[in-house]
Image (cartoon, rainbow, N blue to C red):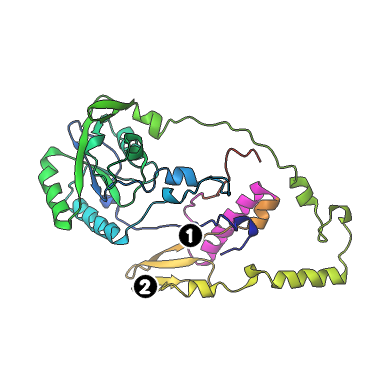
Amino acid sequence: MVFDSVYQGNPLVNALAVGVMRHEDIRLANASGKGNKVVLFGARTGGDGIGGASVLASESFDDTKPSKRPAVQVGDPFAEKVLIECCLELFKGSLVEGIQDLGAAGISCATSELASNGDGGMEVELTSVLLRDPTLTPGEILMSESQERMMAVVTPENIAAFEAVMDKWAVEYSWLGEVTDTGRLIITWEGEVIVDVDPRTVAHDGPVYDRPYARPEWQDAVQADAFTGSVQDAGRPAAPAELAAAITELVASPNMCSKSWITNQYDRYVGGNTAMAFPDDAGVVRVDEETGLGVALATDANGRYTYLDPYHGAQLALAEAYRNVATSGAVPMAVSDCLNFGSPRTPT
């Protein structure tokens, strides 16, 4: 938890989910097998979340722009739990050949990624999608990021068993189309083709933007600044009064206070598997009591370092997270790049 005035009107929150599973239980996101059926199940598609992640990720907020609040997805924790249990039963019965969640860009992303990862193509009829809002246009249905939805590929032989699991958990579903061998992703609306593309061009081989970038004019001045806050006085020792004022300002900063008033509001020991937590610099969660295996996690960054030098600031963030995991007794094995870059439309 860090306080900085640059986030006053646009707070930044990073979240991470970590799970453990056996290799044989992994289900991949690919659409293979000509004639296999494509099904969308879970919550109905609504207007919430249209352009959510893609719009909000690098958006600038000010009083002159319309509110983006309707673009934020509306979650339903109970529906999510039911969908999780439903998927686990599908996996246990080996009833799906491939499966994909609907995250950023919704159906357009799920269909293109499934088809691109598979060995053929896919045909989908968009009018079969179950809607919460019947006024949605085909483009909005494709791009909606409504939560608690999954897309799966099912063999014709498993259709009845799949539907039985859906009925058991009272999860709605709609059969949208099937896997083809054309190598094309074809989406129709009331029988009219509205999408006909090579899925790889959408999912993996998209255009790479070469946007202009430049070093901020103020960067050199910031790096050359002295303790006194004046570039012209660089090199001059700070006077006692200046040191006293700096110390007073430092201890008054909310970044120096204990964050326990936040962390203590959460039951971090739920399930009894938390081995280390705040105030330790890395969290350790027990995976298996018999083997003693666990997972250690740390998320770190120093905005002041990055402000002074973005390149080295990013390096230091990674190094700090690495050290904190290592000091917990774990071996660092992976890193998630979440550098939170600003808008690419701003050269500096």
Along the viewing direction, whichever of 51 and 104 lies nearer the viewer: 51
Which tag, 2 or 1, sits closer to the chain's start?
Answer: 2
Quadrant of the image occupied by residue 316 = bottom right
Rendered position, 140 above or below 91:
above
Q: Position of residue 54 (x, y in %)?
A: 46, 42
Left/right of residue 307 with respect to residue 15 in the rendered view: right
Q: Is residue 145 visible?
A: yes
Q: Position of residue 239 (x, y in %)?
A: 88, 68
Residue in the picture at 67% in, 57% down: 304
Residue stretch rendered in magenta on the structure = 309-337
| Mark 2 neighbour density, 10 Å: few (under 14) some (14–19) many (20 or more) | few
Q: SS for tag 1? A: loop
What residue did someone put label 1 on? 331
Quadrant of the image occupied by residue 235 = bottom right
Residue in the picture at 13% in, 48% down: 163
Residue in the picture at 64% in, 38% down: 347
314 inside magenta stretch: yes
Report the quarter where the C terminus lies. Answer: top right
Along the viewing direction, whichever of 107 and 44 lies nearer the viewer: 44
Dot label at residue 270:
2
